[in-house]
Amino acid sequence: MNYTFTQREKMVSYTLMGIGLVAMIAAFVMDAHEAWANLLISNFFFMAIGIFSMFFMSMQYLSQAGYGVLVKRIPEAFSQYLLVGGPLMIIIVGLGGYEAIYHWMHITVEPGSEHYDKIIAGKAAYLNIPFFMIRSIIYVGVWAWCAHMMRKYSLQQDLNGGEIFHKKSITMSVIFVVFFAVTTFTSSWDWYMSIDAHWYSTLYGWYIFVGESVIGIAAIILFVLYLKSKGMMENVNENHIGDLGKWMFAISLVWSYLWLSQFLLIWYANIPEEVAYYQYRIEHYKYIFFGMLAFNFIAPFFLLASRGAKRNSKFVLIVAVLVIIGHYMDMFQLITPGVTGGPDGYIGFVEVGTWMGFLGLFLFVVKRSLAKASLQVESHPYLDESVHLHH
């Protein structure tokens, strides 16, 4: 069955993008630092869905798993946002980075100069503008190329059959996973951890990766349930929903473990330059800082602990929405305090409106991609296994 991107759905996307434009204009009028922070948060939020979708598909190919074949078109469509969000990220971290986001870009490395900072000067071999921008371009360039090629091979497999394009997809999965294994960490150091350039955590890369994963799997679940509500993807049953629910439940627990590990180790050591990072967020962003735990840990743990709950579309839908909200709150408290450095932080119209604008752009890209091919892949060697999945 094919998906049709209706005129009404297009108007919804355009309306959301219009709201986002108004919010961004208002943000720049009020505070450019806040505006650039919101752009970074919202664009990366949806890039995270695309990045995880590539990882999800790659794991399916490399492990020769069959359960995800029926929903494969959804992460494929999500991955296409990287072709749009990637260039936007270069603009945000380049132009916005110098203007407002990264204070290290204004630090000089010569001792005795007005803007000299000993700690940042010690990181200058890695943390300098030319190398930073080269890395950023490489990240998004390779991610987008892999997304384009994976989609291309998948569509060619539908048209031509055989295993040649399946094998090419496996090769592309290897390339992506190896590249991603390095760049998921270095990009998190560059784009997010360097906002607070005096602070660092050896768990930060893992933390960002797991956060991306939860957002990504929640988005896949929401789209699967949305399409099923439209009478599509009729072969997707409670067994497929259960497997996706297991992903969301497990990754939420891993995120909680990493959050607690990082927080407790730094807090217990009580080293001033490390504790300051959390102390500022607890004092000025306490409702967001602790509130996200309710969405990201408590809700998944208590609502999805049983086998039946993971196979129940209503429970899974509720948890997916909650973790989407919770991980936006997490990104907000990771990025905004270091950029604005202002008083108590809150999420208002500007923040929500900017996110809605990027949601409109994301939905436009994804739905247009979904409409270009059948929702069910053809000629996949594990298609029959996925159709008859039973646990």
Image (cartoon, rainbow, N blue to C red):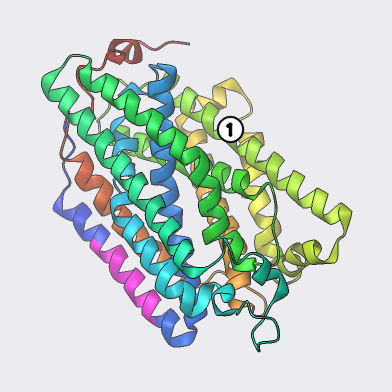
Residue 57 visible in the picture: no
- How packed is label 1: few (under 14 Cα within 10 Å), some, or many (20 or more)? many
Q: Which residues are magenta?
A: 14-25
Residue 249 on image: x %, y %: 58, 32
Q: Quadrant of residue 356?
A: bottom left
**Magenta stretch: includes residue 289:** no
**Residue 3 horizontal side relative to residue 92, left or right:** left
Question: At 37% across and 29% down in the image, what residue appears?
Answer: 173
Residue 263 on image: x %, y %: 76, 52
Residue 256 on image: x %, y %: 68, 42
**Residue 228 horizontal side relative to residue 352, left or right:** left
Residue 272 on image: x %, y %: 84, 66
The kind of secondary structure the magenta stretch mainly shows is: helix
- 127 versus 312 height, above or below: below
Secondary structure of residue under mark 1: helix
* Quadrant into which the N terminus falls: top left
Q: Determine the residue located farthest toward the left in the rendered image.
A: 159
Report the number of numbered marks.
1
Question: At 31% across and 13% down in the image, what residue appears?
Answer: 382
The amino acid beneath tag 1 is Phe
Residue 291 visible in the picture: yes
| Residue where numbered disc 1 is placed | 249
- 15 versus 364 height, above or below: below
Considering depth in this image, is 291 or 189 the residue closer to the camera? 189
Question: At 76% across and 70% down in the image, what residue appears?
Answer: 283
- 92 versus 134 height, above or below: below
Considering depth in this image, is 218 or 84 the residue closer to the camera? 84
